[in-house]
Amino acid sequence: MTHPAISATGLRKSYGDKVVLDGIDLHVPAGTVFSLLGPNGAGKTTTVNILSTLTGADAGTATVAGADLAGDPDGVRSVIGLTGQFSAVDNLLTGEENLFLMADLHHLPRRAGRRRAAELLDRFDLADVAKKTPATFSGGMRRKLDLAMTLIGDPKVIFLDEPTTGLDPRSRRTMWQIIRDLVSSGVTIFLTTQYLEEADQLADRIAVLDGGRVVAEGTPDELKRLVPGGHMQLRFPDSGSLRRATHVLQVSTSDEDALALRVPTDGTLTALRAVLDRLDAEAVTVDSLTVHTPDLDDVFLSLTGHRTEETKELAR
């Protein structure tokens, strides 16, 4: 039986009178991307800090890649990598010197460390700037170097705490592809982000954290179905078909000009089939069908009462 990459039960953490984590449970299968979403102050970074042994929990238990967080913190550290919100890159060292330093900290033999650094510089398209200091790098290049430093130790689980904050769209998509490639090689990614598109694109499962508690968890599609507003739009070849469909389905949100009918649905295949079966039984012809579901920003707003930072930026 294989261990889950991360398993946590009842994690709690307070700072003085402020409860940051109020008993959260997490289960992350190996070789997947698990995304933790939440507004500022929800406890995302605290969760990462606890699971990566940077701070202790007040209560609860957890294992990471089979190593017990409280009983074997060194075992946890040996199998994880962490890329935080702020780059750990040293601006006084060159790109390759930053990697050499990490190799030394991981006690890799000199030759193996140099070879590993060269492989990572090539993998992240940084070989041409290996001899330059990160002060000359773009934001995207710095984040790639930061992640390359995390990978020196060949971790099984990587914690990425808002890894694309501040990156331009092109650099963000480059980072997404790097994450996908890591997962395809068997690495587990624990991702915190305020970019809903990022979670939607990358995550196999998402947990929404608010007020120190997990308020919802599921696949992106499962979370979207939690929010009202999903519907299918049916188009018909003529007004007669539209009128018969309106009568059969007993809905009134029809558009005579567009020969279209809007039907509330949760977006599941069962619900779609039920509507089509009812129309087929009455010999009503449908020209086309499109399904509209709420997006993750709707989910985030519904569950936490907040818009995301990404949406706020777009609204400015």
Image: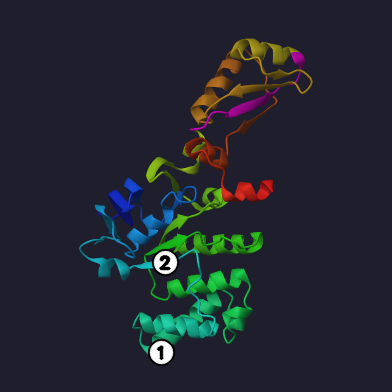
Is residue 150 positioned above or below 214 on the image? below
> Residue 203 at what x, y percent from top left?
48, 51
Q: Is residue 31 visible?
A: no
Q: Earlier in the sequence, mark 2 or mark 1?
A: 2
Residue at 56% of width from left, 63% of height from top? 175
Given the image, on which type of amino acid does mark 1 rest? Arg
> Between marks 2 and 1, how big is the CA–CA gap?
24 Å
Per the image, label 2 sits on a secondary structure element best described as: strand
| Quarter-of-image position of residue 125 | bottom right
| Mark 1: secondary structure | helix
Q: In front here: 126 or 21? A: 21
Report the residue that reaches farthest toward the bottom: 110
**Can residue 281 be seen in the rendering of this structure?**
yes
Q: Position of residue 152 (x, y in %)?
A: 42, 76
- Part of the protein shown in magenta: 226-239
Give the crowd class for mark 2: few <14, some 14-19, many >=20 residues within 10 Å: many
Q: In the visual, does 134 lie left or right of 6?
A: right
Q: Circle 2 sits on which residue?
A: 82
Q: Quadrant of residue 168?
A: bottom right
Residue at 60% from the left image edge and 14% from the top image edge: 249
